[in-house]
Amino acid sequence: MKIVYLDGLRGTAAFIVVVAHFFQVFMPSVFEGKKEIEHFAFEGLAARTPMNLIFNGNFSVCLFFVLSGYVLSCKFFKTKNNSVILSSAIRRYFRLAAPAFFSVILAYLIMIMGLGAFDNIREITLSSMPDPFAADARLLTMLQESLFYTFFTYGSGYNPVLWTMTYELFGSFLIFAFLLTLGRRNIRFAGYAILFYWFIDSYYLGFILGMLLSDLKNSERDWLAYINKPWINFFMLITGGFMGSFPYINPQGTMYSFLVWESSDFSFFVFYHVIGSSLIITALLNSRRMQSLFSLKLFAYLGKVSFSLYLVHFTIICSFGSFIFLMLSPYLAYSLNVILTITITLPVIFAIAHLFYRFIDAKTLYWLARWTDQLFNANKSTRRDLPM
């Protein structure tokens, strides 16, 4: 179900993920918190303050998960029709797997052709990120990774951004199962509470909170309207942004230290990013100004190509982008080289993402829609033809 302003937010989040990986390759100190590998004076400040929102890719991924929870359940709460869930469930693996598979093919071709350049620049950038092109070059291994391990074991051997695909697939079916069993029952709110407790510091919490927001917004009445006040929206936006900027580095000694309590295994990093995402999306659902902003053509376009942009950008940064940086290194200062590399690489990323959307992602959506329409129409015809 397409909601333009939600797609606009998704597109913005996808762009932040792109920025995050430029930082991870060329300014690794903001993720590792090591002063000895800083290249720019602002890195220490950015790593420890809400400035990190401009490159906090994990927060953006949590926005994806909450948005998925909302969008996948939205039509059901409006119609209470189980066929909506069944149709989505039938399509879900293929909707994720087809574009992801071709993104792995792209990375695999670059790897076997020796076009990956990231490993050649690590001595300059000082990034400790593993080389994405060091995976097993066997064709069978690549096929197993792209079609099975990526979706069922959190694998991401050829395209590291695919670590989210298992969460997307399992999170989607968690939603479908919940809606089919409890979606029409008032007891579902107890179910939300149980799932919140069970997944409190897991990425799956994002799907649950997104579904809850969809329920509150789209069921019999709009419960979110009761908190639709400008000052409440502003408070949620600021609080959500602060939580969403919870840093990659150890929060002790930063402005985030008060958010952390003694715990041996609680993932504060995930928890605050998910809660922050939920607050920002709640504000967006209630704010006409924010909805108008994220419905602008620029954001709408980013939303349209967001999945393609997410899938291809990392491979391009670590091949073409790294090659450009390597070629310019003997002639330019580090800072100027990074700026010029990003300036040259970004248009290439968007061009490839646009082509990927047009010829792979959009085609996947088209054929899946035709397939499920024919399937459900055939089932309706069969039921009509059965004797009473």
Image (cartoon, grey):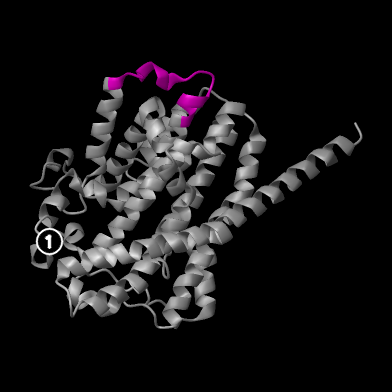
Above/below status of 311 relative to 84: below
> Which element is circle 1 on?
loop
Q: Quadrant of the C terminus?
A: top right
The answer to whether residue 78 shows anywhere in this view is yes
- Please provide percent x and percent y for residue 223: 44, 19
Magenta span: predominant SS is: helix
> Does the rendering let one see residue 266?
no
Q: Quick one: 111 or 263, which is closer to the camera?
A: 111
- Out of 312 and 374, give the one closest to the viewer: 312
Q: Which residues are magenta?
A: 214-230
Question: Label 1 amino acid?
Answer: Phe
Residue 203 image position (x, y, % from top left): 37, 47
Residue drawn at x 36%, y 36% is 197
Residue at screen point 18% across, 57% down: 30
> Which residue sits at x=22%, y=66%?
338
User: Residue 99, how many percent across, how many down?
Assistant: 53, 60
* Residue drawn where x is 65% and y is 31% of the image: 81
Residue 270 spot, x, y in % from top left? 30, 47
Quarter of the picture holding the N terminus: top right
Q: Which residue is mark 1?
A: 40
